[in-house]
Image: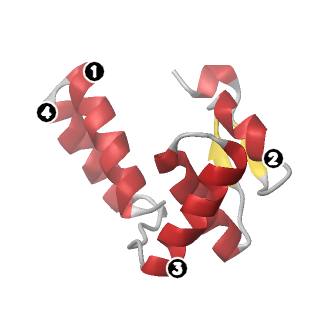
Amino acid sequence: MTVVNLGEVLYTVESRRGVEAAQNALAFIDRSPIQVFDVDRSLSLSAARLKAAAGIGYLDCFVAALAQRLDAAVVTGDPDFRQIEHLVAVEWLRSDDTQ
C-alpha cells in the first residue's frame, strides 16, 4: 500500500473506533508483511491518469497505480474497484472478510 492509503486506513479506523484502535491497526500493519511505499511524482501521475480514466476515488487510484507498477493485484472488498478491473488485477475479499 502507499503511505496515502495507510493514512486513509488509519483515519477511517480512528473515526469509527477511536485513537487506540487506530494505533493498534498501525501496529498490526507494521508487524504484517504489508509493505508501505512512498508516493513519488511518477506514481502520483499514474494515479491521476487512473482517476481520469475510471473516475474512482483518487486515493483508490494510488493503490491501483502501485499495483500496476509492481505487477501485483489490489486486494479489496471495495466495489468501486470493479470499474478498473480491466486496468489492474483485483483479488476480491469475501464479504465476511471485510467486517
Residue 43 percent location from the top left of the image: 52, 73
The kind of secondary structure element at disc 1 is helix
Mark 2 → mark 1, Cα distance in angstroms? 29 Å
Callout 1 crowding tier (Cα within 10 Å): few <14, some 14–19, many ≥20: few
Which residue, given by chain and number where applicable, does mark 4 sit on? 19
Q: Earlier in the sequence, mark 2 or mark 4?
A: 4
Q: Earlier in the sequence, mark 2 or mark 3?
A: 3
The kind of secondary structure element at disc 4 is helix
Answer yes or no: do the residues labelled 2 and 4 have beta carbons within 8 Å?
no
Which residue, given by chain and number where applicable, does mark 2 sit on? 85
Q: Residue furthest left?
A: 19
Residue 65 percent location from the top left of the image: 61, 64
Q: Amino acid at mark 3?
A: Ser
Mark 4 → mark 1, Cα distance in angstroms? 9 Å
Which residue, given by chain and number where applicable, does mark 3 sit on? 42
Which of label 3 and label 1 is nearer to you? Answer: 3
50 left or right, relative to 27: right
Give the colour scheme of this rendering: secondary structure
Answer yes or no: do the residues labelled 3 and 1 have beta carbons within 8 Å?
no
Mark 2 → mark 4, Cα distance in angstroms? 34 Å
Mark 3 → mark 1, Cα distance in angstroms? 33 Å
Residue at image point 30% right, 31% down: 13
- The residue closer to the viewer here, 22 or 45, is 45
Q: Amino acid at mark 2?
A: Glu
- 45, above or below 23, in the image: below
